[in-house]
Amino acid sequence: MRAPGDFADFYGHEHPRVLGVLSAVSGDRQAALEATDEAFVRALERWKRVSAMDSPSGWTYRVALNALRRTKRRFATEQRLLRRTRVVDVVPTVDPDLWTVVRTLPPRQCQAVVLRYVADLPEAQIADVMRITRGTVASTLADARTRLAELLGEPVLVEDS
Amino acid sequence: MSPDLDGAGRAVVNEPIADPTPVAELERRVRRRRVRRYSVVSVVALVVVVGVASAIAAMTGDDGRDDSVVVTPPPAPAGCRPVDPEGGYSNGWWVTDPSTGATATATEVWTGPTRREIRHEFGAPESAVVTPETTAELTAQAEECVDNPPVLPVEEWPARGVVVRSLEDPGVTFVVDEFGSVRGKAERSPLDEIDLPAEGGGGIWGVDPTSERLFRPSTLAWQTQWENLELPDLGGGPWSGVMQSPDLEWYLAQRIVPPDSCAPSAFFVRPDGSELQTLTGQRVGAPEEGVQLTNAVAWLGDNIAVAEFEVARSGCSVGAPGEPGLYAVQPGVAPRMLFHDRDQGGLLAATFLRLDLIRTTTTTPMTGETATTVTPHTDPPPTSPPTSPPTTVPPYDEIPAFTPVEMTREEAGALWEANGVAEYSFVWQRSCFCQPESVAPARLVVRDGRVVAAQAVDPARPILTELSEYSSVDELFELIAEYESNMSEGGTMEVRYHPHYGIPVSFDGDASPMIADEELVFGVTHIAFPR
């Protein structure tokens, strides 16, 4: 099987963003790597259909976030049933303290922040990925920034504020 | 300085935690899925013709075994032949094109914990006319042999070895000899027959040479009295079990370490507690102490044990041996790789002994005479040998119509337990913002608390093929309890149960009204019990 040429381009461009989003959301290196691969394998498998979508990257983010949820659930099940001793392999990131605080936000705020500032997605696309309205994205991001400032004890700098 | 979200976000993207998996590897995974899906679809198509009822029997068998459609190994390419191993872990195969005499070889090579390469060689007689298409096809076939080797009949299994499969990719169960050579795949996965929650994958298992089943010989029983042993307190985590070596000289001991610890988790320890060393042969507390998490699997024979070394944690220095996988370990000897964890997601493994091939030599002290005996295979296998799938309607009856009722989870759980149902079937459907396969109704069959088969109710709506995606009634109770414990303020949950059996038949929960995608809705219908 030969992948369509533009999949490789898409993959090369989007991989660091998708991996970055999952790393920042989960803080779990192994889970992030696994879910990222899963999302791109699915994209490759359905590339003809995915590439024809309005936003192939939006679809991939949604699949990746779902895959991350499943991966973490599987890890939890394995730990419980197989008595495995797996521990979280914490993602080594730049600004680890900031991302650690971001992960303490409610899940919806955390996802919105990461999709906005790591994936650099516009609000409309975040709305599509998270299946919420654009207005909700805007208010969620505003709430998240306020909460982050409270948690960090100082205002958070963003280019769009 | 105030934190800069834009800058921090850009940094995450510009400094990724890992390089992308090569596209060729993604393509390989797609190919493997397609082969497996084809195999599953074929079986499902067949059973649909027979009828829904007989399908359940066809998937589960009638002899108490845990057969399952989803673990049916896909067919391997024809003509895979193993490359002679050079010692240590080896997974290399070659194929030949009879019309030209050309051969292609593919060998798995690991150049780092996550760096997997398939090295190719191609050769042809000088007189042969080999087209680029033939070259590409042969090369692809050889490569496929690496991931999906041919079935190794049980009579050809080595005397000692390991059966292992990836938790990430349960499609193929590899048979690996004690030296780390992949010898083929098991026709059916004996690992499915181990009751994991009850027993783990540990302990030494015998192989029944007639049925390819693993069983636990009474002469090789697992040590169970470990709580009485005086294991040293290493701090930071409790001991969770030990297995005694066949010569009774050592224990393979496992402990649970906390998430932030860089300490090893499995050890060799003398029965009197006088000596303790890591599986990499180091003294406990030595500066070079390895830090990879280790899961004891079992003793393989003599003083050689098998353990899984997991992916090294960040924040801890990487200890030897560095790469995740199964290793043969021995007190005082460096670990030797038996199987690489290619998916980095963990392995499920059990050691085996071909008791019909294991010979024991004994020496009479007075005369110095030696005698060799072959250990007889006396323990019966735990279940009867495989039989042909039944062609009659299976003995399942749907329960009469009922009105679901509200009660507490504890009351429902008590009802369910009081009924003591070990085998049952029901149609499961959930609702969520997820892929179509997740919401398609599936008929599940449960035995002894585990989902052993899943079948699409509507052939036009494919279902998830991973049985781990589904829950038995016992697991539904766990799921509800977990959901309940995660409810935030304003969260809602409505559960209704069967009035007599206590089965949760409808669930509608929203753990937090503020969070999208936390809603969980499912229904259980068409409950049926064996006639």
Image (spheres, rainbow, N blue to C red):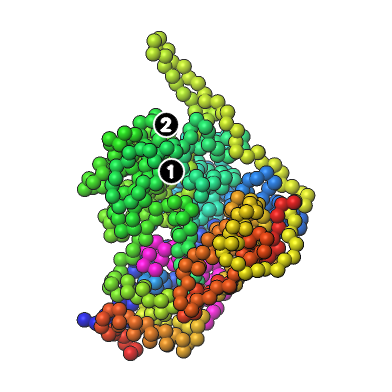
Closer-to-camera residue (B278/B420): B420
Task: Identify the residue position indicated by label 1 in the image.
Answer: B297
What secondary structure is marked by label 1? Answer: strand
The residue under the point 30% across, 36% down is B273
The overriding secondary structure of the stretch rendered in magenta is: helix
Indicate yes or no whether the magenta region holds residue A29: yes
Chain holding disc 2: B
Is B313 above or below relative to B296? below
Asked if residue A147 shows in the view, the reply is yes
Q: Position of residue B131 (x, y in %)?
A: 54, 55
Q: Is residue A96 left or right of residue B218?
A: left
Q: Position of residue B345 (x, y in %)?
A: 44, 56
Q: Position of residue B410 (x, y in %)?
A: 56, 61
What secondary structure is marked by label 2? Answer: loop
Q: Position of residue B146 (x, y in %)?
A: 49, 49
**Total count of labels:** 2
Residue B246 disc label: 2
User: Within 10 angstroms of label 1, few (less than 14), some, or many (20 or more) residues?
Assistant: many
The residue under the point 75% across, 56% down is B397
**Residues rendered magenta in the picture:** A26-55
